[in-house]
Structures are given as structure tokens and as C-alpha cells.
Amino acid sequence: MIKQPQSPTQSHHFPAASTPSTLNAPSRHTSEARLTQPSPSATPPDPAKRRLLHDIARPLHTGIEGAFANDWLRAAFVEALVSDERLPDVVTTEHDLTLMLRGHQWEVDDALADRLHVFTALEDSIEHLEAKADDIRAGHTAPTTVWITTPGDHTDVMYQTIEYWADLDLIALLRGHWPHGPNRRPHPAEWSAADAQQFAVRPVQEALTALQLPR
């Protein structure tokens, strides 16, 4: 059951001609210069250096679709635990962890154990998130929380959980189509199209190596 916040918080529900003077007109040389000078924004950022969680931090929830969804979520998972300076907590399920790591076994590093919360069932992760939201509203401090999971047939319940976190610091990355918000379809940086959906696809073994923090 989705509880109501202990203190009032705002929830957000989603339904569903004049001729220019010749004195002001640009000269032929000026126009040519504009055509020959490349725009500074024409060069997209290096996908290998892109910070996925910073790109996705607003809005706070988004679906990750397509053939490379698991690869993107794995990259975001590693980024959250290893390189994000906010040191976020990460909440996921055993099922989602298996999909991200493609069935590879991983022994959680002691340095990450306090920040990674892996639950057997989606319902358990929802209860954890509601209790954490209550603690924050009661005055306890907590870092950003990154929730990586698969909604399946529970999209409405999950959206209620996200709304329960209204005005708190939650980033929900949801595998598959998300009917309550935006969706992304990431693709490898090697593809010709240069856009914000590009990312550097890393092999699973590289992710596992990154998750073994130096001692």
C-alpha cells in the first residue's frame, strides 16, 4: 500500500511583417562568414565522457527502451557507485542486477555495501523507498537515491512511489516503456547519428572491474 507523506508536500499529476532596412541587412561577406564558421555546438560531447546520471537527473523519472537498455543501465549503475561525486544510494532488484550484469556473479565491495540495496522483489524495494522518504521528512539526511528497476505491470504503483518522493532527491531509471513520463532509446556512440542518446557501450567485464574498488 502506498502511504501518504507525513508532512504536506505538493504532488504533480500528469494526464495526459515588415521589410528590414537595407542599413541593417547583413553584408554578403558577413553572410558568407557565418556559413563557413562551424557552430561551437555542432560538435557533440565525447560519449565516453558523458555523465549519464547528470544528463538524466531532470526529469526525475524516465523509461529506458530499446536493444541497448541493459547496457545503458549498466553504465549508469557503475557511474552511480563508482564515479558520481554525490555518492548516491542505489536501489535495485536481483532480477535487474542479473540483467545488467548479464548473469555474471559479482561480490559487492565492502566500500559499496552501505550504498547498494538489492531486493528480491519489487514490492520490497518500494517499501524501502517509502520508509526512506519518511526518514528524510523526519529530518534525517540522505544522499541522492538512484532507483533502477523494471516496472512490468506495476507502473501505476511505481508512479505513486515516485510521487511520494516529490521534492526529494530520487532518480528513477525504469527499464522499458514508461507511460508516466519521458522515455529514452540510447544507442552506441559508434552509430552515425550524433545526439544526446549516444553513450559508450562498455563490456560487462569492464564494468565488473570498475566495481572492484582499489584498496
Image: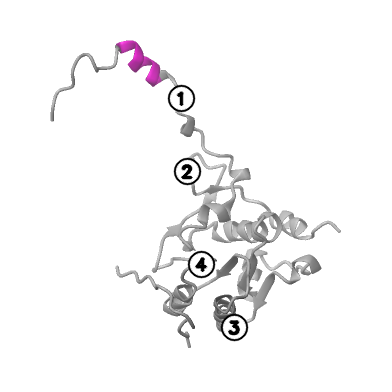
Question: Which quadrant would residue 123 be assigned to in this image?
Answer: bottom right
Circle 2: is it few (<14), some (14-19), or many (20+) Cα within 10 Å?
some
Amino acid at pointer 1: Pro
Q: CA distance from mark 2 to mark 3?
A: 36 Å
Q: Are marks 1 and 2 in contact (CB under 8 Å)?
A: no
Q: Residue at (52%, 37%) from the top-left corner?
A: 44
N-terminal-most mark, 2 or 3: 3
- Which residue occupies the foreground of this view, 176 or 158? 158
N-terminal-most mark, 1 or 4: 1
Residue range (magenta)? 28-35
The residue at which mark 4 appears reads as 174
Q: Is residue 190 magenta?
A: no
Helix, strand or loop: magenta stretch: helix
Circle 4: is it few (<14), some (14-19), or many (20+) Cα within 10 Å?
many
Q: CA distance from mark 1 to mark 2?
A: 17 Å
- Which residue occupies the foreground of this view, 43 or 105? 43
Is 131 displayed left or right of 163 in the figure?
right
N-terminal-most mark, 3 or 1: 1
How far across and down, in percent of the image, does residue 11 sit?
39, 73
The residue at which mark 2 appears reads as 195
Q: CA distance from mark 3 to mark 1?
A: 52 Å
Amino acid at pointer 4: Leu
Q: Nearer the viewer, mark 2 or mark 3?
A: 3
The residue at which mark 3 appears reads as 124
N-terminal-most mark, 1 or 2: 1
How far across and down, in percent of the image, does residue 42 sit?
47, 32
Q: Residue at (49%, 83%) from the top-left corner?
A: 6
Q: Residue furthest front?
A: 139
Q: Is residue 31 magenta?
A: yes
For mark 4, give the secondary structure: strand
For mark 1, give the secondary structure: loop
The residue at which mark 1 appears reads as 38
